[in-house]
Image (spheres, rainbow, N blue to C red):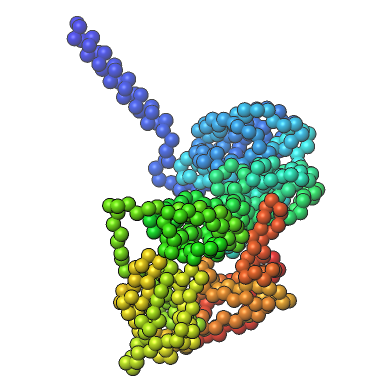
Amino acid sequence: MSDLRSKQVVLLFFLFITTFLIIQSCAQMANPPGGKKDTLAPQLVTSIPLNKSKNYKGKKLELTFNEYINVRNLNQELLITPNIGTYQTRIRPNGLSILLDSALKDQTTYTFNFRNSIEDISERNAGKNIKLVFSTSNTIDSLSISGKIKLVDQNKAFENVLVGLYPYNDTLRIDKSKPYYFTKTDTSGIYTLENLAQGKYYMAAFIDGNNNLLYNSNKEPVDFMTESFLNLNKNETKNFSISLQNLDPLKITKITSTAKTVLYEMSRGIKELELDNKKDLIYQIEGNKNIRIYVKNQEVKDTLFLTASLIDSLNRPYKIPLKVKFRELLKKEKVTQTPLQVSYLPTQGKYVSPEDSLVLTFPKPVVSWDSKRVQFKTEENETISLPDEAYAWNKYSNELTIKRSFLPYREKFLLNLEKGAFVSAENDSSDLQKQAFQFQDLEEYGSIEGRVGEQPNNYIVQLLNASNMQVLYEQNTSQKFNFLHVEPGIYIIRAIEDKNKNGYRDIGNFILKTKPESVFYLEGKVKLKANFQITDLLISTQN
């Protein structure tokens, strides 16, 4: 009898488990076999409050859809204006609830824009234009501002740029205050701020990289109104062109001392450097960013107090004090010497154009050299030495230009550097080196010419590689430009308005509300073929 009861219990348990698994299988949400693929986005069928409701004072929002949904990246995708502070979210199979942690403001119209956060669970079709608008008063604000955002450096519309609208006050700082209303651009760079109240506002647009609603000038491209405020009483259109405007000061981030050099690593790139060189200091800009000072001609035990006059990569002047102290060489420390390296422009495999000089670049300053050990050999078995006026060193003595007008007038030639031709600040010298060069046939080049705007002004015209926006050719002009001996390729052409004739684009200042100098692009791309002239181009200066 006992065995029979045990068998009955085991059988009942087996039947229970089997029934449970069948029920679970039936309850799973899955696509039915066969049939058409679901291409329809989920639709909002009801909500609490209803869209465009008035006098809503609750602390809970409910949304219900016509099918099972998945909620994706809600914290990033959901845009709530004005800001409601913190909230909690509860997800249901066909909807979601939002529980507010604080009460809504009186006399305020709220917009909950879910953007791409809602998708169906089967085919991941994203819901479109899912918004919930309601008011805590008996009216719904209806003004709007729309426009397009462009990234200046790439001349293209940009997605997910934050556009902020701030209540006006004369001390407003967009790096310290969050916008009252905000939205983000779509894939076409278009934005729309809707359901806005009348009033005085300030506007700015920036790439909010860390999603904190505060502008970070060190990393985030920006554009802004130069006017004190916008008096909003009708629908407006405002376009912005964002670019990086880093206002963080240039500073030293690290100092490394050795027995030979002292290296100052800087927070930003450097274009120019001058030291109050009272003791024949040898120094250079290294890697376009750092300052290296060499011990040569100095007493290792001396501590030098200097001032560095700098122009940073944003063309801003600085004076930075430097304390220079070389580390004494340890007794067991060995001094090793390696040959001084030399780099060449044009690089190996590149033709020399009719506009090119030869440029030799060294990793450290050269303190002595012998021009007689720099020779040119031609296919006609000629050996040519150039006069001293053929050569020009840069101010740091780490770049030597061999002027175009002195180069051998031959299709091909060999640059021959004899051993010991160059000696550096660390007493290492160059080895025997040979570099072959060849002039390109003139028929392999084309030319591009045109003008900027309708009236003369000061411009910097640039030809950029269309694939990576690298500047390849540049010239200053009052209106007309003419690029000769241009390699075949696809180019983008832009003109920078150089108002103060300083040869570069001045960036803006969001604190002072000054705009950067304008940039104008030729519409479309230019495809240049060999032995081909492109003329009569017009870069419009009408934004």
Q: Is residue 321 among what the camera can see?
A: yes
Q: Position of residue 264 (x, y in %)?
A: 47, 55
- Quarter assignment of residue 151: bottom right
Q: Tell me the residue at 75%/39% (across/down).
A: 140
Q: Judge by depth and name the residue closer to the eye, 476 or 398.
A: 398
514 to the left or right of 7: right
Q: Residue at x 71, y 53 (%)?
A: 512
14 over 113 or under it: above or below:
above
Seen at 53% across and 54% down, the residue is 305
Seen from this angle, which residue lies furthest bottom? 380
Q: Position of residue 30 (x, y in %)?
A: 42, 38
User: Which residue occupies the foreground of this view, 126 or 321?
Assistant: 321
68 on left or right of 520: left
User: Residue 27: x, y in percent?
Assistant: 42, 30
* Residue 538 visible in the displayed image: no
Residue 530 x, y percent position in the rendering: 48, 84
Q: Nearer the viewer, residue 204 or 129?
A: 204
- Which quadrant of the figure has residue 62? top right
Quarter of the image for the N terminus: give it: top left
Check the image and report above or below for 129 versus 17. Answer: below
Q: Quadrant of the C terminus?
A: bottom right
Q: Residue furthest top?
A: 1
Is 196 positioned to the left or the right of 525 in the image? right
Residue at point 56%, 62% (across, down): 276
Number of numbered discs:
0
Q: Is residue 40 above or below residue 490?
A: above
Q: Which quadrant would residue 101 be assigned to in this image?
A: top right
Vertically, is 148 above or below 14?
below
